Image (tube, rainbow, N blue to C red):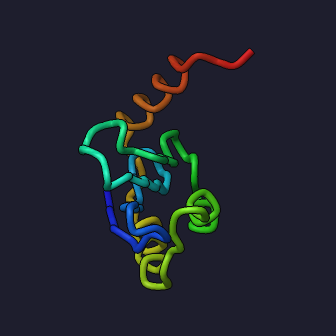
Amino acid sequence: MSRYVIAPHAAHHQVIVGWDPPMQTLFGQVFETTVEEDDAACVLWVGLEVQALTTVAALQDALQGYATLSVDVVARLQHDQAHTPPRSALQERLLQWLQAARPQPG
């Protein structure tokens, strides 16, 4: 998994982005730095589902109110994503099980 701290729009935020190979998704986290570190400090967390954000553009859209991805970070994320080895059979089975166990809407 890759993780990069990027410059936020607001000084009271910390923004972390990265690539999660097993979930095959990009993710972004925004934390409020003016409160104690706990779950309450997390303002936004995107990319929590399997293949939730499959493009850097989708990640940027999700974070647009909090940060802008630099050219360098975009290149790193694209590299991380492009160099992900295929999932093992066990990983595939676990992800299928997780998806089947998730409550379905409706």
The x and y percentages for residue 8 are: 44, 69
User: Total of numbered circles in the picture?
Assistant: 0
- Residue 88 lies in quadrant: top left
Q: Which residue is drawn at 49% across and 52% down?
A: 25
Q: Which residue is drawn at 46% across and 46% down?
A: 43
View extreme (bottom): residue: 71
View extreme (front): residue: 34
Instruction: Specify the quadrant that holds the N terminus.
Output: bottom left
View extreme (right): residue: 106
Q: Residue at x 56, y 60 (%)?
A: 63
The x and y percentages for residue 62 are: 60, 57
The one nearer the camera, 65 or 103, is 65
Q: Which residue is drawn at 41% across and 74% down?
A: 7
The x and y percentages for residue 102 are: 54, 20
Residue 105 sits above or below residue 79 on the image: above
The x and y percentages for residue 80 are: 40, 68
- Residue 17 lies in quadrant: bottom left
The one nearer the camera, 65 or 26, is 65
Q: In this view, does 62 lie to the left or right of 22?
A: right
Q: Is residue 57 left or right of residue 81?
A: right
Residue 6 sits above or below residue 90 on the image: below
Residue 81 sits above or below residue 40 on the image: below
Instruction: Specify the quadrant that holds the C terminus.
Output: top right
Residue 94 sits above or below residue 7 on the image: above
The one nearer the camera, 3 or 23, is 3
